[in-house]
Structure formats: structure tokens, C-alpha cells
Image (spheres, rainbow, N blue to C red):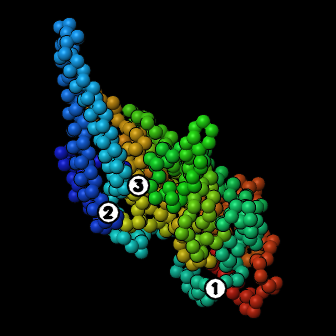
Amino acid sequence: MIDINLLRTDKGGNPDLVKESQRKRGGDKAVALVDEVIALDDDWKKARFVADEINRKINSIGSEIKDLAKAKKKDTPEWAALQQRKADAETEKAEANKISDQKEKFLNQRLNLIGNMVPDSVVDSKDERDNEIVRKWWPEGRTEAAEIEKRNKLGGKDIKGVVGLYSHHEVLERIAGYDSQRGTNVAGHRGYFLTGPGVDLNLALIHYGLDFLEARGYTKLWTPFFMKKELMAKTAQLEEFDEALYKLGGEGDEGDEKYLIATSEQPISAFHAGEWFTEPDRELPKKYAGQSTCFRKEAGAHGRDTWGIFRVHQFEKVEQFVLTDPEKSWEMHEEMIAIAEEFYKSLGLPYHVISIVSGALNNAAAKKYDLEAWFPFQNEYKELVSCSNCTDYQTRLLDIRVGAKKLNDSTKKYVHALNCTLTATERTICCLLENWQTEEGVTVPPVLRQYMGGKSFFPFVRELPGAKKGKAKGAEDIAKAVKQMVV
């Protein structure tokens, strides 16, 4: 949630700046929300004024009652009249406070729909085709242009059945790395079992990712897999409750609702809820390497993204999460995406980093980078990393404060929260399979081998369903060409 004082001119705020930020995010409709919140704020102030006036009246009556008590006039008609006036005022106060509280609750609900302030460094556009390419990296001996050209010579983007150029789900099937049919039988749509090599790769990425971050000053955290509704509501966006989150019914003495987490960012963001870092130079930053299983409905996903284990309802993820001094959060944002880049370079995966346009940002993110890695079969970059600076948008509701405690200080200062994927392991496996496949199987990236007992290669042990034995006419020539397209 943004600071409502940004909308209050009497508090030094500038509503026009918020409107401009909203225009970048969602156009006229988003701007209109600002005017609505300002009107609701004015309405709440009036209701609060009425309640406060009644409270002052009660205090005045209380003073009169004390004076009568001192004068020993408790048995007088005047005393009885004052007691009745006080009782009537208390009833008025309760009703006025109820009205004020209802108006404040609705005000905050609408305020929570206004997005974080978008800085000037974000591209002003609603079209994701305008995402800014910040930089690219390719392993030595490979280039994007060369792979696109060779792919086109092989028959274009939709070619299938070329040895050495299978889609990730076909590679995983051929090395006996997962069982989607039995997974669907047990768990339903997009359910799966990882088996053998799939388990090896998944665990290796988790262990390597956690060690990778620990070596860079991060503290490992294995988080809860579900959260209380009231805390989830302070860190997840409202639309996520219906579109992404799985709800658990309350049981036993608690009787409260809980939600399965969609990312370890959610429980880690609440790890310090209600705390106050009074010595930021000594206590910050707090850098966490969060590991969790994640659960998402993934409503609306379709096409190639639903192949194999690329976009599934349950997956593992290693996440960077940092709390930092507000003056240092933009520097930290660059550091976190650089760490993610270093990780994917170590795995030998080509990628580019893009800065997401204003109209595609979620409400919490002031600015977001995506790291998209190259998938040879699909002949395109696909998202593996999301890296966001959420400034104080989440920490305000979670009440994670920073700075020395000062007497009568009316200005609250909150830490800035940043999150950045290191690896969503199932999705990273997909990318590894397409980039490290050969004609005979899959080579294991060298950095992962120590985490899987020294295994360096997974051979193909299965044929694809419906595939004919032997190579089709001309397949040998195609396979030779493909050799130059993969690591």
C-alpha cells in the first residue's frame, strides 16, 4: 500500500504525482481510482471529526461530573442529568466510531488498489512488446542470430522430431525423468511425478542455488508452505486470492483460513512483521535465500507453456528476498539481478534481461526486471527470473519499520523489500534440457555434478509415444546441423 499522505496536500503530498504513476500503469481508469480514494479520505476525515467531537463532549461532561462529586452533589437532579447525558453521548460515540471505522476500512481497501510509485527509469507503455532489453549473454561459440538462422533452415519454429532438437518435455520423457500420465491420474490436470534424472536435477538445482546464495551473504530459510489469511492479505495482491492461491479451510481450535504459498517471498516478507530496525547501518540489509515448494492455480495458462513441467501447479523455488534501508534499495535491486545472471551464466544458459513496461507491473513492484533464457526448440526467450523492487509497498502493511525511535515522531519510515527468483527449479530444468541435449541424451552442467553423485550424462532410454524406430530420411543430415545449435 502507498502512503496515503502522498494524496494529502495538507501533509505535503502531491496527488498529481500519484495520478501520473497510475496513468503509466493503467490509463484513465487507474487515474480515476486516485480521485475516488481522495474523496473517500475526505469522507472518512469528516466521520472521524464527528467521532472526535463526541469524545470531547464526553470529556467535558466528565469534568462537570468531577466538579459535582467534589461538591458532594451526587444525589442532586443535576448529577442524574449529567449521568444521562454521558450515557447518551457514549451511545453516540459507539455509533460514530462504528461509522468512522467502516469508512476507514473501505478507504484502505480502495487505497490498496493503487499501485506503487513508478520511477522515471521504467518504460512508459502498456504494450509488453516495448519491454526494454537491458543486456544479453550467450556462451562462447553460440549466438542468437546463428541459432535462429539454422532453425529456419531446418524448417522453422514448428519443426518436430529432429534428433538433438527436442522440446524440453520430450527430452524429459526420453531420459525417464518424469511421469505425467500417472501424475495426472493422481493429482489431476498438470500433475506429475519427477522420476530418476528429474529428481536428481531438481535436488541439484535446489542445493546449488542455496549454496550459491549463501556464498554471497544470504541466510538460508526453509519457509512454511501456508500462511494465515490476514498475513497473506498484507503481502499478496487481491486478485491473486482468486487467480493464483489455493485456500485451505480452518480446522480445530484455530478455525482460521489459510492459503498455500505461491512463492517463498510471501512468508519471508512477513518474517519480520511488526519489527523495527532502529540501527539500520548495523542491522540491514537482511538477505534471505528462501526455499519452498510453491502452489499456484496458473489460471489461463495455455499453449506451449503447459507442456511438461514448465508451468505447473506445484514446483520448487529458491528465492532471493532482501530488506534494506530505503536509500539503498535501488542499488540492491541491481545487485540481485546481477546475482541471478551470474547463476545462469554458471549453468551455461543464454539469456537476456528486460525491464518491464509500466503497464505490465504488478501493484507492489515499482520496477521489475525479468531474466528470460533461450529455449532452442521453441526458438525464443522465456521467463525464468522476476526481480522486483517493491520499496515500502509491502512493509507498510506488515509494519516493518526502520530508523531511530524519536519522541513524538509522527513520520513513520519503513524498510524497502525486494524479491528476485534465483531458480524455479522445474522451469530451469526445462531450459537445461533444451540447451544441454545431445543426439544420445542430456549432458549435466558441470556445476551441478557434485550435487548428484558425479553423474555427468543421462542417456535416452525411452522412445517418444508414437515415434517410429530408426531415423527418417535425411535425419542424419539434420542431426549434424543441430549439433552446432546446442552446448
Mark 2 is on which residue type? Answer: Ala
Q: Is residue 166 above or below residue 419?
A: below
Mark 3 is on which residue type? Answer: Ala
Q: Is residue 118 above or below residue 6?
A: below
Q: Residue 205 at x, y = what percent?
A: 65, 56
Q: Residue 37 at x, y = what percent?
A: 28, 53
Q: Residues within 10 Å of mark 1 (few under 14, many from 20)?
A: some
Q: Disc 1, disc 3: CB below 8 Å?
A: no
Q: Residue 40 at x, y = what percent?
A: 27, 51
Q: Is residue 96 above or below residue 12?
A: above
Q: Residue 374 at x, y = what percent?
A: 56, 71
The numbered dot on residue 159 is 1
The answer to whether any part of residue 411 appears in the image is no
From the image, tell me which residue sits under label 2: 30
Alpha-carbon distance for marks 2 and 3?
A: 15 Å
Residue at left 40%, top 62%?
361
